[in-house]
Amino acid sequence: MPPRTSAERNSTSRFPDRRTVLSSTATGGFLALAGCLGLLENGAEVEETAPETSEQVDFDVEIVADDLAYPWGIAFSDDGSTILVTEREGTLSLVDRDTGDHRSVDGTPDVYASGQGGLLDVTFHPAYPDETWVYLTYAASDDDGASATHLGRGRLEESDPALESFEQLFVVEPFVDSTAHFGSRVVFGDDGMVYLTSGDRGFKDFGPDHVSQETTNAIGTTLRLEPDGTVPDDNPFVEDEDVLDAIYSYGHRNAQGMVVHPETGDIWQSEHGEEDGDEINVIEAGGNYGWPIAHTGCEYNTDEPVGADPRELDDVVDPVYFWECGTGGFPPAGMTIYDGEAFPDWHGDLFVGNLAGQYMGRFTLEGTVVEGVEALLEGRGWRVRDVEVEPGTGYLYVAVDDETGPLVRLVPQE
């Protein structure tokens, strides 16, 4: 059964050197979205079937660095001259894009490197280098050994790499005795605010009392903060005593991908489901994304649905694309929307890393409708952890989640 968009829910189903060229052609096929899509809720008519084929885009894959320890996040300065990569076990690396040499950045925080925890995402302040702040998300523990997702920042000194004056900005409390589901992507929105994802920490008490539906804590949410970590006055719940002021959206399981659409400014996320149930979402201020009271996945190793059919709940925001129970899912990681010049045929496409499936998904978009999906980088055994566009060249950089994971880039085939 193919994956589905929210528009399809009218069916009866429940749902050698560092520049070595590794590949000379795009791999993977274009997967059609079969079936009649009918009408969207707003009455707009959509095509009955998605395109079955796409123009092949040929590219080469070059190794940039081949000895990073479980790379997790990639960040570029606006001109592409500075590349930072987080390594989950605790190292922040400053990478030379030409030679692949990388130097460890001093001054990073102590991290809880266990299970899915560690040093996670990284992003530059949008005014860098005038504002030299670099933001990190990471798991850290308290005196009792419980852990939580943290956001912090320091001022980057590039010549002798260090994060100076590092400060903790926000802690996703409460601390939990778990090594799972830290979420932890961080981006700056077009509004200049910091957006941070937090996972549900693996709680299994499915139902309305689940921590992701309990809005007095920050677990299972998207958070919106000022660059200094304080809460903006215009956050959606600042007047609601029953909701934590920092919350922007809630009802999330474990969003490990997030990107700001370069044309619309919308916040897009990729989120892990339970047994399948993986999602791509566009985030609305104040939105409840349903976990676990509404979900398209099942409890692990069963065919028992988690929660209700999302169509049954009017106060839940539907995903724009999802993989329901029985499809095999798409365990998603970092994501980007292509806006470079190196691959004009990819302009506006969404790229999402796939972990267990070991490939990168390319999603062609029309607004918020996914019209087709292509699998890239198949057959290499690569768990794709993050993907970013280099601003200067438009090359697509990919971090591979492995003990000696490579950082690679896709370049136009000569």
Image: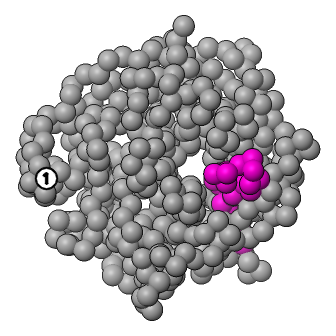
Q: Nearer the viewer, residue 197 or 385?
A: 197
Can residue 17 be seen here?
Answer: yes
32 vs 35, left or right, is: right
| Residue at 68% across, 42% down | 77
235 vs 160, left or right, is: left
| Residue at 67% across, 51% down | 127
- Majority SS type along the magenta span: strand
Colour theme: one colour
Task: Single out the residue that lies furthest toward the front.
Answer: 130
Q: Residues within 10 Å of mark 1 (few under 14, many from 20)?
A: some
| Residue at 50% across, 30% down | 340
Residue at which label 1 appears: 40
Magenta residues?
119-141
Q: Nearer the viewer, residue 257 or 113?
A: 257
Whether 135 is among the magenta residues is: yes
Label 1 secondary element:
loop
Task: Single out the residue that lies furthest toward the right.
Answer: 160
Can residue 114 be seen here?
Answer: no
In the depicted structure, whether residue 242 falls above or below residue 92? below
In the depicted structure, whether residue 254 falls above or below residue 106? below
Whether 256 is among the magenta residues is: no
Residue 362: % across, % down: 39, 34
| Residue at 74% across, 16% down | 17
Disc 1 marks a residue whose amino acid type is: Leu
Q: Tell me where residue 117 sits by quadrant.
A: bottom right
Q: Quadrant of the C terminus?
A: top right
Residue 274: % across, % down: 38, 60
Residue 190: % across, % down: 50, 55
Q: Quadrant of the N terminus?
A: top left
Residue 287: % across, % down: 35, 70
In the depicted structure, whether residue 376 falls above or below residue 320? above
